[in-house]
Image (spheres, grey):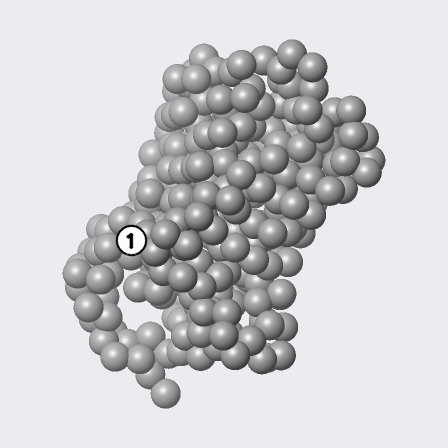
Amino acid sequence: MSSPPIDPSEERIGLAAAIAAAIIYGAAYPATAVALRSFSPVVVAGLSCTLALMVVVGLAAARILPRPAVDSMTWPRLSRLIVLALLGGVLFITGVNIAVAITGPTITGFVAPLYAVFATLFAVPLLGERVRPTTILAFALAFIGTGLLADAVPTGAPLGGIALGLVAAAMFGLYVVLARRWGEPYRLDGTLITIANLLGRGPLLLAAAVVLDPGKVVPAGPDPAAVVALLTIAFGSSAAGNLLLMASLRRVPAGRASGALLLTPVASAVIAAVVLGDRLSPMGLVGAACILVGMALTSGLLGRPSRSTSPR
């Protein structure tokens, strides 16, 4: 059974939401680098996502966001919600945090956004979406551009951390596809999925941090910039980014939404240059251009909006 043809205006809104989410996600990496001056990676995730959870629940209670559909929470609904919360929530953020601890935020910042590639690959068997030659070209450009933008992986970098970053990216890519596949049939709306994700990323990780080392949860005399960065992550990638991604997946196929998310490492590099003073080399600028072209090709920004149907 196929869904109705995609409305062009809804498609533009969906792509705009995905691009905005990519920029916000990109801002999280330099913000995390600043927050790590005073907080551990687990505490950064736990505190920021707990604050984001409070924001999302408050907005839903005030009806600024749609209230989550929690009525008739049958086992099929609950089980799928748990799977999404694990893939897009606690497992993903834990994998990324450990990867950051092993290889550093810079390398992880370029590996983790490759969930866009995995999402498009998973969308083929799970959503019946097609992979066109332009899609293959786009992702080839994205991989080449990411390598150039990262200025190559430093010699001797721990391969375990890079592998863990790829595993985390694969989990988030699967989360993107399953969120679209299960969203409407099981009434898993964006607010409900976001709250479920933040429960695992926030209170659960924060509780683990308290058990492991309570003294480091709230350090004495934290750097004010680190506190501001923590709040930026909470209101940005943890809350607004997730909600924008859910809004995008409601309107466009997962492959096109994930293509727009390829902008994440570019946004991260640009914001890092402004906030941290990291400047792109000429080769890095070429890499950024490759990723932008790949993102535009995959999301359809260089062509006419799709009028085709998308199998559920």
Please indicate whether residue 6 sits to the left or right of residue 144 in the image. Answer: left
Q: Which residue is under mark 1?
A: 15
Where in the figure is residue 91, as x and y percent of width and height? 67, 52
Residue at (40, 44) in percent of width and height: 240
Please indicate whether residue 130 sits to the left or right of residue 221 in the image. Answer: left
Q: Residues within 10 Å of mark 1 (few under 14, many from 20)?
A: many
The N terminus lies in which quarter of the figure? bottom left
Residue 252 position by quadrant? bottom left
When the figure is inspected, residue 175 is found, relative to residue 53, above or below; the finding is below
Residue 183 position by quadrant? bottom left
Please indicate whether residue 225 sits to the left or right of residue 243 in the image. Answer: right
Where in the figure is residue 167, as x and y percent of width and height? 65, 51
When the figure is inspected, residue 58 is found, relative to residue 14, above or below; the finding is above
User: Could you tell me if residue 80 is visible in this image?
Assistant: yes
Task: Between residue 278 and residue 209, name the one nearer to us.
Answer: 209
Please indicate whether residue 7 sits to the left or right of residue 46 in the image. Answer: left
Where in the figure is residue 14, as x and y percent of width and height? 29, 57
Q: Secondary structure at mark 1?
A: helix
The C terminus lies in which quarter of the figure? bottom left
**Residue type at the position of mark 1:** Leu
Q: Residue furthest bottom?
A: 1
Residue at (75, 36) in percent of width and height: 209
When the figure is inspected, residue 104 is found, relative to residue 168, above or below; the finding is above
User: Could you tell me if residue 262 is visible in this image?
Assistant: no
Q: Residue furthest right?
A: 212
Task: Between residue 152 and residue 262, name the one nearer to us.
Answer: 262
Residue 128 position by quadrant? bottom left
Where in the figure is residue 302, as x and y percent of width and height? 22, 51
